[in-house]
Amino acid sequence: MALIVQKYGGTSVANPERIRNVARRVARYKAMGHQVVVVVSAMSGETNKLIGLAKELMAEPDPRELDMIISTGEQVTIGLTALALIELGIKAKSYTGAQVKILTDNAYTKARILNIDQHNLKVDLDAGYVCVVAGFQGEDENGNITTLGRGGSDTTGVALAAALGADECQIYTDVDGVYTTDPRVVPEARRLKSITFEEMLELASQGSKVLQIRSVEFAGKYKVKLRVLSSFEEEGDGTLITFEEEDNMEQPIISGIAFNRDEAKITVLGVPDKPGIAYQILGPIADANIDVDMIIQNTGADGTTDFTFTVHKNEMNKALNILRDKVQGHIGAREISGDDKIAKVSVVGVGMRSHVGIASQMFRTLAEEGINIQMISTSEIKIAVVVDEKYLELAVRVLHKAFELEAA
Ligand code: ADP
Ligand code: ASP
Ligand code: MG
């Protein structure tokens, strides 16, 4: 007997028939003698719909109230999934995040899980129940409902698997595993039988939405056996996230290409070049809990510096307001501007460590298509570039081809 956590995403619970399918799969695992915890997302489109409703009443919704609203999508699907299981004769019980006691910090809309009380679930699992837990939500120490960021049900699944010491966490979605890039953009993309944890972490952090980055972080920290699978297919091994460094001879240089349309670029022009400038610009941004991704600073011949960084698109206006109200006058910047028509494309692979020339191959490929690179950032296993968003799909396609990632 094993303890298995199965997470089903929005398309997998998009209507009653699909929920019935989920229940049938869970029933098969129960019939094999396993204990099963099911984590579900809201029906696909539901979270977006709820955000839209909130925005009709307030352009930048109050975050506490927004979480109150957007956490409801998952409350519907846990109840429906439990009903489908009970109809099949299986003992099942639904749980909100608060009922489990998924404790988070109070960073509404992007809260982090601090602790999970596994007592209630254990008691019910031992009594033969399937526990159906709402993804994406938790509560802070004062009982306020919080949510974990878009795609956060993955994190609920993996965090529960870690807390319960589950034998495996299965992420069921609408593709049958992790591909060399998003198969919706490049139909020739190839499914990977396995991918190293490090590469998956990098792909997720660079925008591959197949797994939310925090779920991959949890899997790494607690060594959760994690697999991505299709909920629409009966068979298939999906993609396993591995922790062992595979035989390096076998390692491809590049494993995948990620992209992200959710970032915006902020440029602070003409800042006198003095110690402390980066801190004076980014300090207030960090104090407002706005995450910064890429950063570049360039000093010109006139002794002033241009400072550019990227934030989530949703936070661009907030960041611009902070800079214009609190920072611009103070540091004497000439101009502050924002651009949300950008996209980031990243090539990722652990094999890059031992190969030179990947960056130049990437830049040459983009140059041949006339795609201008606005920003570059690198790590040991990644090269990321920011380009005009209108070139995103072209960039991903030509890089996928240049690095020979297509199906054989
Ligand atoms: P769910 O609702 O099940 O959580 P998501 O839409 O969040 O599903 O994630 C699955 C989607 O991720 C796929 O439909 C695919 O378009 C996208 N995706 C992005 N990059 C990849 C990749 N490298 N491999 C597979 N899917 C990817
Ligand atoms: N329903 C949430 C979202 O759409 C969480 C999830 O699906 O993982 O982001
Ligand atoms: Mg998802």
Image (spheres, rainbow, N blue to C red):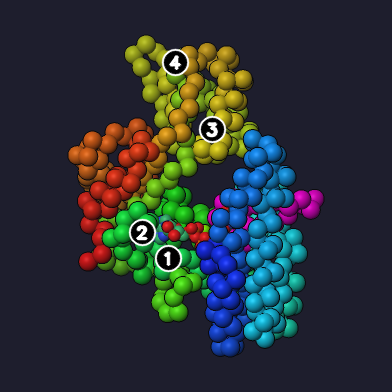
Q: Please state the horizontal and vertical placement of residue 218, each as a whole percent of the image.
A: 55, 60
Q: Nearer the viewer, mark 4 or mark 1?
A: 1
In front of the other: 125 or 358: 125
- Whole-angstrom CA distance, mark 2 to mark 1, is 8 Å
Give the residue displayed 72% in from the left and 44% down from the top. Answer: 64
Of the numbered discs 2 and 3, the one sitting upstream in the chain is 2
* Callout 1: CB less than 8 Å from ligand 1: yes
Q: Which residue is mark 4?
A: 270
Q: Pick whichever of labels 2 and 4 is earlier in the sequence.
A: 2
Mark carried by residue 183: 2
What segment carries the magenta color? 135-157
Measured in 3D between alpha carbons, the distance from the residue under mark 1 to the one under mark 3, in whole angstroms, is 32 Å
The residues tagged by marks 4 and 1 sit, at their Cα atoms, a distance apart of 47 Å
Q: Residue at x 69, y 78 (%)?
A: 92
Residue 11 as seen in the image, left or right of residue 303: right
* Three-letter amino acid code of the residue under disc 3: Met
Is the residue at mark 2 in contact range of ligand 1, meaning its CB lies under 8 Å from it? yes
- Secondary structure, mark 4, is strand
